[in-house]
Image (cartoon, grey):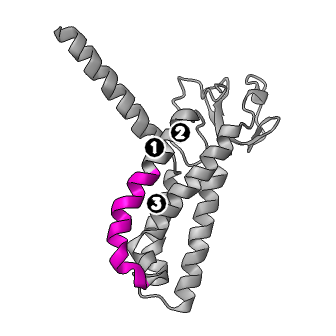
Amino acid sequence: MGTETTSLTTNVKNKTFSGVGNLIKLLPTGTVFLFQFLNPVLTNNGSCSAVNKSLDAVLVVLCAFSCCFACFTDSYVDSDGNIHYGVITATGIWPTTATDSGSVDLSKYKLRFGDFVHAFFSVTVFAGLSLLDSNTVRCFYPQFLSEQKILLQVLPPVIGVISGGVFMLFPNSRHGIGYPSPSTSTSTSSIES
């Protein structure tokens, strides 16, 4: 009985950590860091002028584009164990560097429907993160400060549940630019559908 309980607990923990890992992979870490670092500066901590609003709007758009673009990148490990990144196309991965990729079949890294789903939800999650940021709220729509607390309580869990459900249907096996790098000892198998 004790072994079955331990096995069940371990199985639940593994599935939980796997689900959390997939949610963490929704946004490129560099993009989130850049937004969190520059947003207070560009919004003047929420005390915006017209220039601050323009600069922060450009930041939000560029970061959203980065989240979307990163969903269409992947990496592979060459025969020497070096990690190379590339852009996903309909015919396979287009490497960003001119390396000898003869040891890896780059056509296996083709564009899939799930990549578009991931891009949409990545931008959605980033929009929730950026547009509910307290500096952004004070800068762009200060009249919603009273509703911000309610939105912060309601929207992130709703977005997380919906995104988590979609990512269970369309699991992401890509290790693109801005996402956690794969181990050099394992393949970056994005071949799975």
Q: Disc 2 designates what residue?
A: 167
Q: Is residue 54 left or right of residue 134?
A: right
Q: Amino acid at mark 2?
A: Phe
- Residue 1: x and y in percent read 18, 8
- Residue 40: x and y in percent read 42, 76
Mark 1 in CB contact with mark 2 (< 8 angstroms): yes
Question: Between marks 1 and 2, how big is the CA–CA gap?
Answer: 8 Å
Dot 1 or dot 2, earlier in sequence: 1
Q: Residue sitting at 51 percent across and 47 percent down?
A: 26
| Quadrant into which the C terminus falls | top right
Residue 60 appears in view: yes
What is the magenta segment's predominant secondary structure? helix
Q: Amino acid at mark 1?
A: Leu
- Residue 51: x and y in percent read 56, 89
Nearer the observer, 77 or 16: 16
Q: Disc 1 designates what residue?
A: 23
66 in relation to 180, above or below: below
Circle nearer the viewer, 3 or 1: 1
Q: Disc 3 designates what residue?
A: 33
Q: Residue sitting at 61 percent across and 26 percent down?
A: 189
Dot 2 or dot 3, earlier in sequence: 3
Circle number at residue 135? none
The secondary element bearing badge 3 is classed as helix
Q: Is residue 143 magenta?
A: yes
Q: Which residues are magenta?
A: 142-159
Question: Between marks 2 and 3, how big is the CA–CA gap?
Answer: 23 Å
